[in-house]
Image: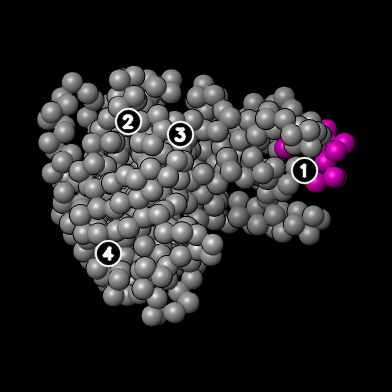
Amino acid sequence: MGRTGVISTPHGEIHTPAFIPVGTMATVKGVLPESMQNLGSQALLANAYHLYLQPGSDVIDAAGGLGSFMNWHGPTFTDSGGFQVLSLGVGFKKILAMDAKTVRSDEVMAPGKDRLAHVDDDGVTFKSHIDGSMHRFTPEISMQVQHSIGADIIFAFDECTTLMNTREYQERSLQRTHEWAVRCVAEHQRLTTLRAHRPYQALFGVVQGAQYEDLRRQAAAALGALDFDGFGIGGALEKENLGTIVRWVNEELPEEKPRHLLGIGDPVDFFTAIEHGVDTFDCVAPSRMARNGTVLHVDGRFHVTNARFKTDFRPIDDSCDCYTCQHYSRAYLHHLFKAKERLSATLTTIHNERFIVGLLDQIRASIPTGEFSALRSEFLGRFDAGTQRAAAKS
């Protein structure tokens, strides 16, 4: 099901498959927008929840929209805020195991966390993680916030469940998410007419359903019948089931509309998801790993903070064309981390983002030439083996 394509937006085209780096607060942490453009990023994704709380979507609207506000001239995405409202609000981990089939939704809590978000059929009431103030998100408010932020591609408000929720709760949640999707479409159409002076924003529906085939297919078919411009695949799943779940969903979704897999950033997962029809991805992993000193290499990831790199004057990756690898050594990066200099995160993030963006460029080029399977075998063989060797040395 792997394919190439083009998503056209008011601020440019996105050639797919593509990785969309995450700039949660209208910035990829520690990296200039110009640097993200230079390393090949086609688009950036920001988070509606965080921008709603700070600086406020009204501020961004007054600035002319997200791109103008952050000095990024290419396409932009915002996710709906649903995952952040629920995960930050109740302390969810991103993936939770199904430990018991009797767990109720109000019992799904991470240890030591207080419940800061409460879901009802109309929306979610939540407490700000910044100052404790109370807020309310409904489908209509999420659309209003995202229209004010002004990204080219926005997502419908959904309830993000976990693998600890019961089948019964997943069914109720799926119905709620569908009802919210209908309301998002209606509000999006109203705002599009009201704000005709702004560029058109494409609205993507979000497919939930955890790891249940019937629920995933049901959700995809139902959302596919609504007036969405594209679709996000989200929700709780175990990585070993990723390809299977993505295939279920994409067999039901309209073939002519783009499909975005939310929150996935591991190289092996790119190959799996693209094989089953995914077009775009976003994830904080490349920048988060970079800030912790983990760098990506064709022969696997490794920690540049390890003592063995103190006098290693090679670049992170001899085959990489990023600014960091062209100008800085592992020894220098090791020094920056040990000295707790902020430049450490900037330089390693530039490299990691370029590595992932470049990998998707390679995958995109391999599909029409029939070389996808060969690229997957070659890349993952080297990457996985190298990661294991680096772990052993550490």
Q: Is residue 185 left or right of residue 299?
A: left
Q: Tell me which numbered mark, 1 or 2, is placed earlier along the sequence.
A: 2
Residue pointed to by mark 3:
25
Residue drawn at (24%, 53%), measured in percent from left and top?
123
Badge 2, how many Cα within 10 Å: few under 14, some, many 20+?
many
Distance of label 4 from label 3 (alpha carbons): 28 Å
Residue drawn at (24%, 68%), measured in percent from left and top?
172
Q: Please state the horizontal and vertical placement of residue 214, each as a whole percent of the image.
A: 27, 72
Residue pointed to by mark 4:
173
Whether residue 203 is visible, yes or no, is no
Which mark is drawn over residue 305? 1
In the image shown, does 144 or 307 lie closer to the viewer?
144
The nearer-to-camera label among 3 and 1 is 3
Mark 3 residue type = Met
Q: Tell me which numbered mark, 3 or 2, is placed earlier along the sequence.
A: 3
Mark 1 residue type = Thr
Residue pointed to by mark 2:
57
